[in-house]
Structures are given as C-alpha cells and as structure tokens.
Amino acid sequence: MAKTTFTVPKARKLPSGAWFIQLRLGGASYSVTEATEADCIKAARRIKAEYQDGKLESRQAESRLSLCKGIEAYCEDRANGLSPATIRKYVNIKRNHWGDLMNRRMDQITKRQWQQAVDAMLARYAVGTVRRSLGMVKTVLRYCGVPVPQAVVGKASETKARTIDACKFLEPDQILRFVDAAAESKYCIPLLLALSSLRIAEIDGLDWANIDGSTVKVRCVRIQDKDGKWVFKEGAKTEASIRNVEIQIPALKAAIERERKSAGKVMRCGQEALRRNCAKVCAAAGVPNPGIHGLRHSFASLSAHLGIPEMISQEIGGWANERIMKEIYTHVARIDLQNSKDKLSAFYSQTASEPPDSRT
C-alpha cells in the first residue's frame, strides 16, 4: 500500500532564518517552525497525518507534560526501538541536565528560558555534550508536538558546523602516518578495525570466529544496558550495520595473522583503555586525535578523497543515515578543491621561458 503524502501550505522563511507553516485543522491553529524548509514541511505533514489518524489530541495532551514526564513517555513508547545505551542517555539527561526546566510543562517553556538553560549548561559541560543533549530533547519535544525554540536550535547547529570542521576525522594525508604508528602498538587490531569503519561497540563485540580470511563479519555488539551493565547483543546498531567488511590495510592483515585464535574476544581491553591508547598512537604519529569514532569517520574521509561513491562507502561502513557521509564528503571535497586551485596557481606562476612543471 502506497504511503500517503499530505499536502500542507507553503513554508515561508522568517526574519530569524527559520521556516514557518501555519496549519488549520478542525478549526484549531497549529504553528510549525523548523530550522530548514524540508524539516518544516516534514513536521507539518506529520501533524496533519496525526490529525487524520485521530492521534493529534493525544499529542496535545503530551505537550502539557513536564519535560521530565515527556522524556519518560517518549522512552516508554519507543522502548522496543531505542537501544539500551540511548535509554541510559535519556536517564542521564533527566538526572543531570536542564535544571528547573525538567519540572516545567513543555508547552510553557519560553524561547528565553531555553536560551538561559543552554547558557547555564555551557557553563558546566562541553559544547558537544550540550549539543547532543539538546538534540535528544528536541526529539522528545517533536514527539510530544511541542515547537522547538529556533534560537536554541540555531545555536546548536552553528556549533555542529564548527565541530565538523574540527578534528573529527583524520585527513587523507594523516591516515598513513597513523597506520604506521598503530602497527607498532599492541592495540593495532582494534585501532585499525576502527579505521576500517567499525564502531567501538562492534569491535568490542567481535569474536575471532567472525574473522574469516580477509573479511570481518559484523554480527554482534558489546554495549551497556540501561543500568550500565556491559552486555553482548546479537545484531548491530541498525540493520545496515550487519555487514561484511573486507580487510584492506596490510598492517591489519599482518596483525590478525600474527594474533589469530580459533575463538574468543578479539579486543582484550576495555573501551576507555582503547580510547586512551588511540590518543597515544596519534601523538606518536604526529597527527590530531579524532577518537575511536573519528577513526571510523576517517574511513569516510579517505573514501571521499579517493572518489569512492557515497552510497558504496555508506554500505561498507554500515551507515543507515547518509548525513555523516555528506558532511564528511563535503568537507574533503573542499580540501581537494583548494589543492586543485593551488596547482593552477603554481602553474600560472611560471614564466613562459620555463618548462612546465610535470608535477602540476
């Protein structure tokens, strides 16, 4: 059965840069404000769909809940779809984030109060922590049918753009230096598996039985449940994450052959220990430390640099969402574009009497 696409009024751009749609449903008015035109249209269609299905009244009731109760309602409704790690993050947000806003009705929190709460959070936590917490709260607000305050979302989006340009992955010219340093480390295998696109939970859940010849079969993860207990979970983060990854790095192949066992965990250290040693290896290589997850993103940056299509890299890396791929591909494209401009500049800086430089 084809999915119904609901028609909504045309979105208009506000002076703030946000996009706005006014809906009239059953004699009632519903305002939709989002950071982008596409998100605004999507949110308006969702509201109209809920109205058609008779679910809008329940959403209105949920909007009158406190932020704390809204988080609980969202987690309860999505219990089968959220990972234990995500539920644990929401529990942490309820306990430690957003101060007095946790006990206020979501539909009564003003834009000014949100901004004050963000400023208070930034005084206590790193920008990335505030951004992630805000993103998760935004999901709850959308679920409960509460408009997201654009001043706060815009601020988080700007922070995110700066973060992408910061050291979240190694540039292509840094990767080989990292590989050489990792080859000398006793953590070579998990570090280079991360560089091959595996998430840290996938590496921690990897058994030697799942490494066959030159292929790594991603079938299990090791994560913390909602109570903080480490458990093995069959499957992976998403359906796309269940995949076979070919081993392309010679140093990784050599280390696997050298340390191969018939069965048992491949990663013999804890996740925090691996993160600490990633920093040490990066220091030895003379490259910035992107972290273990940044090594996974480095796989995407190298793919972009080598001209591998996004869809192929997305499949190899098990990304269900193409957003990260597009961000990294765009970033690397800018670097390669500048390199091309430099080559043109170097060519035209020569005099007509000089022979052309073959390197340009």
Image (tube, rainbow, N blue to C red):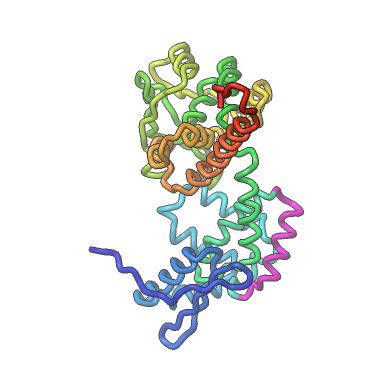
Q: Residue at x 65, y 41 (%)?
A: 166
Residue 334 location (% of width, % of height): 57, 42
300 to 4, vertically: above or below: above
Quadrant occupied by the N terminus? bottom left
The stretch of residues the image draws in magenta is: 108-126
Residue 290 seen = no
The residue lying toward the viewer, choosing from 33 and 102, is: 33
Q: Main secondary structure of the magenta part?
A: helix
Q: Is 121 in the magenta?
A: yes
Quadrant occupied by the C terminus? top right
The residue lying toward the viewer, choosing from 46 and 69, is: 46
Residue 25 location (% of width, % of height): 42, 83
Report the side of 322 relative to 275 (left or right): left
Question: Farthest residue in the front direction?
Answer: 353
Q: Residue at x 46, y 21 (%)?
A: 249
Q: Quadrant of residue 168?
A: top right
Residue 355 location (% of width, % of height): 58, 21
208 to 232, vertically: above or below: above
Q: Quadrant of residue 221?
A: top left
Residue 279 seen = yes
Residue 127 location (% of width, % of height): 68, 50
Q: Total label count?
A: 0
